Image (tube, grey):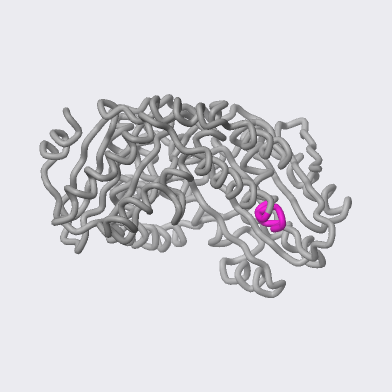
Amino acid sequence: MYQQIALPNGVRVLTQEVPGARSAALGFFVGAGSRHEKPADNGAAHFIEHMLFKGTGRRSAAQLARDMDAIGGQFNAYTTKEHTCFYGRTLDRHLDLGLDILEDMVFHSRFDQEDVELERGVILEEIGMYEDAPEDLVSERLAAAVYKGTALARPILGREATLAAMTGESLRQWQREHYRPGAIVAALAGSFTQAQVDKLRDCLTGLEPGPVPKIETAVYAPAVTARRKATEQNHLILAFPAFSYLDDRRAQLMLFNALLGGGCSSRLFQEVREKRGLCYSVYSYVADHEDTGLLGIYTAVSREQEGEALDTIREVVCRLADEGPAQEELDRVREQAKANLLMGAESVQSRMSQLGASALLYGRVREEAEILELYDAVTREELRELAGTLFRMERASLSAVGRVRTVQDYAHWLGR
């Protein structure tokens, strides 16, 4: 069982003790990601993530690193389109210092201009790294195409032109405007004392309340995009519109994604790779947001095998839409999902992440028993109906990177 404290300024503090644990994981989840940025601010949320490791009023970047290493702590952060998270894990005897480090970083970073200039170069290198990774590039281009004209279309890392205009003061101001108490959840799991919970609550109580950042609504629109690049393989994503992570059918979608392309026993892996030997990598994934989402099917194939691979993938999804899955498939992926949930709960890091992300994104925490019930309630008929709803080729999109054909060629294959 977890405990929740709602502070007067809007911050929510969630805690869960894990019997037998010798460590604690703490995370600050902030409802500010790339989709909260204006076009000229693109990349600000991620830039701030970097800057919070560059020093505070009390610690230089080097001192932060030394303090983290001195207690054997594991500290990190990530930025998504929906939110940003800063987290750390320490032995329970070092939690007081771990809390002090994380709170100091998140709420008292200095945003020194010299550090901004240095870190801008680091982020540009990170952008270059993604440009050289076709699996990431093909996904980024898909989002840019299907959500064109909205914040969801813009890259989390930003662009060289927008990053160039950012200063320490502009980033500090963006943080002030978006790191509002009503958009912050603190999650603590593992071994801790009531005094440490009180300390966490006290450090968050003083945050000044203000309006919570709003998002611009996005709607999926079918699109085709192709980028020529000198790669050994063509990287392809065939995508279909799905629904938001707030939809009541999310448990159905997660199980459906698993049986379609979630592992070695999935239909895509067995048909495209094992039976026909057309590729090394093929899988499906769900990219869902507060108001929209998609289901994507990724593969990387040689130019010569591309046509057959795409035709085979289309056969797999059309067969699922017509017939639905077998009961054996549903039972298998259901057990996989339940096992993943229960085994993940043995990690204090996973528990902390579940608490924080759920409370921030869904507004409440679904505990293990409720999630297991949702999985158990999914029926074969529901998945057949879901497949028929999802797999409509007139709503499909395609993103291609490599020695690829033209947009018109792929549009013709889709039946445009």
Which residue in the rendered view is the most extreme toward the right?
194
Q: How many marks?
A: 0
Q: Is residue 320 above or below residue 353?
A: above
Left or right: 273 with respect to 328?
left
Q: Is residue 34 above or below residue 189?
A: above
Quadrant for the C terminus in the image? top left
Q: Is residue 365 visible?
A: no
Q: Is residue 347 magenta?
A: yes
Left or right: 85 with respect to 199?
left
71, 133: nearer the viewer:
133
Residue 86 position in % (x across, y down): 60, 52
| Quarter where residue 100 is shown | bottom right
364, 79: nearer the viewer:
364
Q: Is residue 237 above or below residue 246?
A: below
Left or right: 107 with respect to 405?
right
Q: What's the residue at 75%, 41% (across, down)?
A: 13
Q: What's the residue at 80%, 65% (across, down)?
A: 22
Residue 49 position in % (x across, y down): 51, 52
The magenta segment? 343-350
Residue 296 position in % (x across, y down): 36, 41
Q: Is residue 344 magenta?
A: yes
388, 166: nearer the viewer:
388
Q: Main SS of the magenta segment?
A: helix
Q: Is residue 123 above or below residue 201?
A: below
232, 81: nearer the viewer:
232
| Quarter where residue 392 is shown | top left
Residue 386 position in % (x across, y down): 45, 28
| Quarter where residue 110 is shown | bottom right
Q: Is residue 116 visible?
A: yes
Quadrant for the N terminus in the image? top right
Left or right: 179 with respect to 244?
right
